[in-house]
Amino acid sequence: MSGMVDAGAVRTRLPLLEGKVVVVAGVGPGLGRAIAVRSADAGARVILAARTESRLDAVAEEIRDSGGTALCVPTDLMEAASVQALADRALSEFGRVDAVVHNAFVQPAYVGLLDAAPDDVRQGIDINLLSSLNLTRVLAPALVESQGSVVMINSMVIRNQLPNFGAYRVMKAGLLALARSLSVELGPDGVRVNSVAPGYIWADSVKKMFERRAEERGVDPAVVYAEVAADTDLRRLPEPDDIANAVVFLASDFARAITGQCLDVNCGHTHH
C-alpha cells in the first residue's frame, strides 16, 4: 500500500529479561506474537498460552529458531482447570514465573452500548477482564516468590470518545481498575502490576479495517491511513513491536519502581 508510513520498530536485543520466565496469555499472530518474541529477544524463557495450538507452535518455532526458549501450553483461559494446568506446567518446567502478560481479548460488535447484546457483553467481560483476574490469582504465589510483575494490555478506547466502542470501553475501563486494584493488593508483597494502552496497531486487523473503509469510499487505503495518522503527534501508527517493547520494559527490573500505572503507546494519538 503505497504512501503508508512504516517506521520499523526497534529490534535491538537488550537482555532486560535475562534469566526470567514470562507467561504470555493470548498469543495470536499480531501483538501476542510480538510480545512473546520480544520477551525472548530480551532473554526470557517464554510460556505461550492460547487455545489455538497451531498459533502457539508457529510463534514457538520462531523463538527457537532465534536461539530462544519457548514452551507451548494450549489453554482455555475461561476454564479454571485449564488455567491451573498452565500454572502447574510453567512451574514444573521452569520452577518459577517472573512475569505474566495478559493479552487475551475479544472485540465486541461495533454497535452502540445500548444496542449491544447482553450475552455478548457478558462474554466480553469474562474474556477481557475476568480471565486476567483468574490467571493472576493462580500465579500470585509464584509472582510473590519471584518478586515479579504483571502487565495487562489495555486500549486507547479508555481515553478517546470514538462511538460504537461502548462495550469495549466498559471492559477495558474495568481492566484498568483491575490492574490498579491488584497493584494495591500485591504491591506490599513486592509484585508490580501495570498496563499498556496501545492505539491503532499497524498490523493485519487494522490493515484490513482500513482496506474496508477505503473500499467503501472508493479511495486508496493510504488515504485512510494518512487521515488517522494525522491525528497522532508522530503522524504514524504504532506497530506490534512498539507495544511489545513497552511491555518488556515494564516487566523488567528497569521498571522496578513503577506500579499501578498505565503507559499509553499510541504515537501521540491521545495524551494522558
Image (spheres, helix red, strand yellow):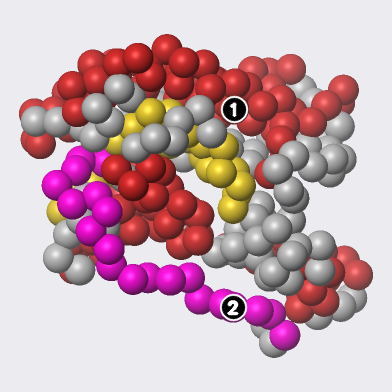
Q: Crowding at label 2, few (<14), some or many (≥20) Cα neighbours within 10 Å?
A: few
User: At 38% from the left edge and 42% from the top edge, which residue is drawn?
Assistant: 255
**Quarter where residue 204 is shown:** bottom right
Asked whether 12 or 210 is in front, the reply is: 12
Say if 46 sits above or below 257 in the image: below
**Residue furthest to the front:** 257
Residue 6 numbered mark, or none? 2
User: At 43% from the left edge and 71% from the top edge, which residue is drawn?
Assistant: 10
Say if 39 sits above or below 112 in the image: below
Q: What is the magenta range?
A: 3-28
The quadrant of the picture occupied by the N terminus is bottom right
Residue 200, position as x, y percentages in the image: 67, 56
Residue 134: in magenta span: no
Residue 11: in magenta span: yes
Question: Helix or strand or loop: what does disc 2 sit on?
Answer: loop
Q: Amino acid at mark 1?
A: Leu
**Quarter where residue 112 is shown:** top right
